[in-house]
Image (cartoon, grey):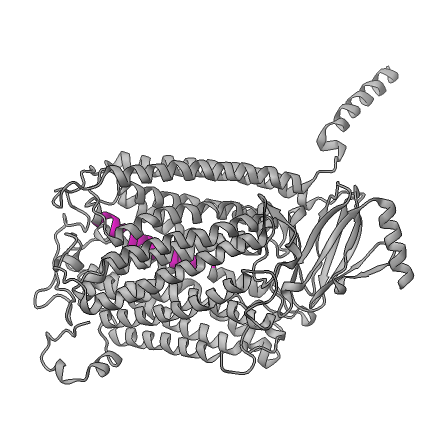
Amino acid sequence: MSTPTTTAGHAAVPAWKEWILTTDHKRIGVLYLVGSMAAFGVAGLMALIIRAEQMQLGMQIVTSGTQYNGFLYFHGAAMILAFLIPGLTGFAANYFLPLMIGARDVAFPRINAFSVWLFYFAIVLALLSFVVPDAPDIMWTGYPPYSVTTSANTSMYVFTVHLLGFSSILGAVNFLVTVIYMRAPGMGWNQLNMFVWTTVAAFVLQLVFIPVLAAAVTLLLFDKYLGTHFYDPSAGGDVLLYQNLFWFYSHPAVYVIFLPAVGILYDIMATMAKNRVFNYKAAVYVGIWGTVGIAGIVWVHHLYISGMPDWIRLGHMVTTLLISVPVGILTLSLWGTLYKGAITYNTAMMYAASCLYLILLGGLTGIPLAIPSMTLHLSETSYVHAHFHFIMALFSAFALFAGIYYWFPKMTGRYADGPLATASFWLNFIGVNVTFWPLFIIGKEGMPRRYWDYEMFKDVQVMGFYFEDYHKVATIGAFTIALGMLLQTINFVYAAFAGKPAPTNPWNSKSLEWTHTVSPPGPGNFGDTDVVVDENWSPYEYNK
Amino acid sequence: MRKLLSAMTGLAGGALLSTQAFAQEIRNPAAEWEHLWNEVIMDITVIGVIMSVAAIVMLVKYRATSPEQVGTAKKLTTVQSISFALIPASIFMADDFYLAANGWTVWNAYRRVPENAMEVKVTAYQWYFEFEYPDGTVADGSDFSAIKVPAGQPTVFRMTSEDVIHSFGLPYYRVKEDVMPGRITYIWINPDKEQTEAVLQCAEFCGDSHSQMANPIHAVPQAEFDAWLAELAAEG
């Protein structure tokens, strides 16, 4: 990536120092991208080990249950906490949110730099957990009493969550202040990009709910190392308190991932279809903010089989099902954005189009899980595993990749499209379906999550095939994705240095990050002229 | 008059008792689960197919014919905007409430234990389940041996854990519930078929041997069950 040198004196500082000491939101965004993609790579390797282990009955790759559980733990924790959340709210928001609102930087650039380094410290700390004796094996959920009584090192997990939590809270405050006070003169709330709206909503969720997670894991730490009994029923504690606190944050965290992913899709689809966002105000005020409103009253569906009182399970059935209303309005608006559009296809749009399918599959398969009587059987099976991978891992990751392809010319001045990009897209898209469809099928027949073996089901057949056959297919799918991701990484690195040069606004977008600045933007984003917009301006007004 | 009244009361009582609500007919949650599953799958398939077809049609139909072409969607009027929010919201809510009502019915079948159910006390350990039958006989599941229940006899499992959280899952019977220290939870099954061989497994992550915490669970004729229990008692 070329170094912007619009400000005199910058070139004298060595490049590595510029990156370490930077307070520029774009460089911080790139640092988040590199860190989260690295976490994705490591967590992806763990996924391959997990799938390879499950390919056949019996133990093949791992040498003990604890080792397998360690891989599962790291895969889940890294994918959610170090890849999806930092990738979407760290990278994408950092780089593009100030550009989209016409701001020269974020409100508190140094705090921004502090948050990205907290994120890196957290990743290092998480990786260190592999070299300490008794590596953590508590899953990313860390339920007590197991996490308290196991000899595994729970403190590494807790401190990682603390660091990431601090990082996210600082980011949330910073970006909310930025959007509230630093929009370009003339820019009203209803002129914001959908990505800005969804990110603001995600930051509100982070700000409200992260402290609850921090409290939950801190009490866990106290119970394990200081001898308190918050979660210990034998001394008056409550064994379910942790689960309630944990999911009170961790279900809204799904929307922290989901909403910015949807925002990226809106921006790509409106640009590529050269069309206005369908029913913008309903999408923002009912869709996005409705989701935020209901986000805090759905957590109990993670506890449907935990022995919660019957009345609260039924109450949460209704609130959980009702999340389909705002999400449905968002989906309808996303679909409507294509209506009467003029769609041009590139890799970004191909990923975005595949997301339309992934959001449907992932979202609709969640409906049975909102109903307690259905969940009594489906909970903790690979049906759940497949469902949340489709909506969180696949939909959100594909949206992030769509965003990287879409904004690649902005970040590097070069296109990332080409035969390698197309090949890796198809490998990824076919791969995810081959991996997770079989898990839906055996999940419905009882294949449990978090099992390295399924000896007890070896004679059970579904549609004429054994569980082992389905696992084989899923493993082949996982390796197909791995090949696709490898090609994609090669493509990104190659394109960043030697890709086809792109003009400043290659997609003819109306959004400020394309129309008002060069690629890549230099320090201060917009050169010498401040961005001013008039009241009729909109990032999606193509047919005027 | 008295005779007439008692005859009428008898008739009314008989009629009421013959209805499902009063007859306390023993329902089968697993069968009701399957029924609801089919209903929900139908529901989400219809939504999924409509939305997929709409997406595919638009993605194909609205391809740009030239790079300069722009979309021609009109700005919605206020009435249109509100309608496009309210109408779909009403449809989604109607579907939600429909599914919630059906889910509630099945839920009641799951949570109301028949009065004549046999009670088995389950204690979970890392990493096995232990079963105590009404006569005090204990079946130790730690050797992964088959656990038996009498076919045709509703059985309720009252469960607690001695260490960490486990979960008592019976996929064949479409039910599971967590087993926790300091709390007692329950599930019941209606093993209506003889010689049903099913899997019992732990479904909540509980450490190293979580993946091996399983037993076969067999529904057998009453006589065979009694003989098995007597054998266990004799072994002490």
What type of secondary structure mainly makes up the magenta span?
helix
Which of the image's four quarters has the N terminus of chain A? bottom left
Q: Quadrant of residue A5?
A: bottom left
Q: Which residues are magenta?
A: A251-271
Question: Residue at horizontal 32%, vertical 67%?
Answer: A90
Q: Nearer the viewer, residue B133 or A544?
A: B133
x then y, percent, for residue B210: 63, 65
x then y, percent, for residue B114: 76, 42
Q: Nearer the viewer, residue A128 or A373?
A: A128
- In the image, residue B12 sits, relative to residue A427, either above or below, namely above
Residue at the extreme right of the image, as rendered = B234
Q: Is residue A193 visible?
A: yes
Left or right of residue A244: residue B7: right
Question: Residue at horizontal 18%, vertical 54%?
Answer: A511
x then y, percent, for residue A294: 44, 51
Which of the image's four quarters has the C terminus of chain A? top left
Q: Nearer the viewer, residue A153 or B227?
A: B227
Left or right of residue A131: residue A499: left
Q: Is residue A267 visible?
A: no
Q: Is residue A265 magenta?
A: yes
x then y, percent, for residue B68: 11, 45
